[in-house]
Amino acid sequence: MTQSLLRLGAIAGPIYVFVVVGQVLTRDGFDITRHPVSLLANSTYGWVQLLNFIVVGAFVALAGLGLRQSMRSGPGHVWGPMLVAIFGIGLIGSGIFPADPFDGFPPGTPAGDAADISTSGILHFAFGGIAFVSMSPACLVFSRRYSNLHDRGMAVFSVATGVFYLFAFFSVAASQGAVWANLALTAAVLLGWSWLTLLTSATDVQLSSLDEQSVSPATGAP
């Protein structure tokens, strides 16, 4: 069961990216340099992105449970999995409460920011903020754990992902949607999903190795 939960986390990122890329390439009027992915939840086919948020968020939350079950002790064995689960919950909330249309998307929407923000839009930003803010500390917590395990590669990758994720998140707000900031945020999201896939896959492999050792019959030397 634990390994099944971890594998949900491993496939969550590829599913999310595949669905988003498909929409970016096919949805009229959407510009990744101007529009956040959340806007894809609007118009006739908005249900695709809403479902993407909810399903992938559920996978990530369950993967957080799998991480907690697989980590009984050591640095970050409580907070790391918990922050991953919170990230998933933030994604689920972002799918339940869609963002408001703005800045020309969907087509026909006036350019610039929306004049009024709906309750759904406010809750979407709140849950989205929860997701973004939980990812960065999760990376840093697991970086400490990997350092303790002497896995320098994952430790450095975790730190880099966490720092860049936080930088990109605040850059969008500070720059008021500048193109470079939107592209940085897109890169950070891709980096974050890559990190989560590696984290859950590596943990799954470790558990598989332990399972194989526990069931292998003892053999004597010939």
Image (cartoon, rainbow, N blue to C red):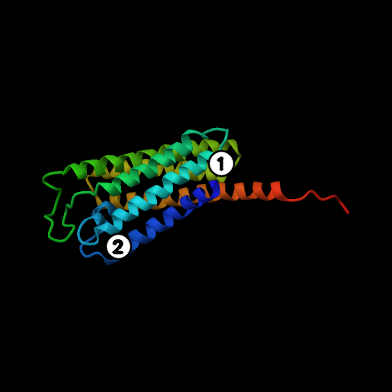
Instruction: Please name whichever residue, 137 or 65, is drawn nearer the observer in this view of the structure.
Output: 65
Q: Pointer 1 and pointer 2: residues touching (CB < 8 Å)?
A: no
Instruction: Please name whichever residue, 4 or 169, is drawn nearer the observer in this view of the structure.
Output: 4
Whole-percent x and y of residue 24?
A: 29, 62
The residue identified by callout 2 is 23
Residue in view at x 18 percent, y 42 percent: 119
Residue in view at x 53 percent, y 41 percent: 155
Q: How crowded is mark 2: few (under 14 residues within 10 Å), some or many (20 or more)?
A: some
* Amino acid type, callout 2: Gln
Whole-percent x and y of residue 140?
A: 46, 37
**In which quadrant is the C terminus drawn?**
bottom right
- Determine whether 15 is above or below 83 in the image: below
- Secondary element at tag 1: helix
- Determine whether 70 is above or below 40 in the image: above
Q: In this view, does 216 lie to the left or right of 153?
A: right
Q: Is residue 199 left or right of residue 179?
A: right
Whole-percent x and y of residue 121?
A: 20, 45
- Secondary element at tag 2: helix
Q: Residues within 10 Å of mark 1 (few under 14, many from 20)?
A: some
Q: Which of marks 1 and 2 is in front?
A: 1
* Amino acid type, callout 1: Ser
**Lower position in the chain sequence, tag 1 or tag 2:** 2
Q: In this view, does 16 lie to the left or right of 121?
A: right
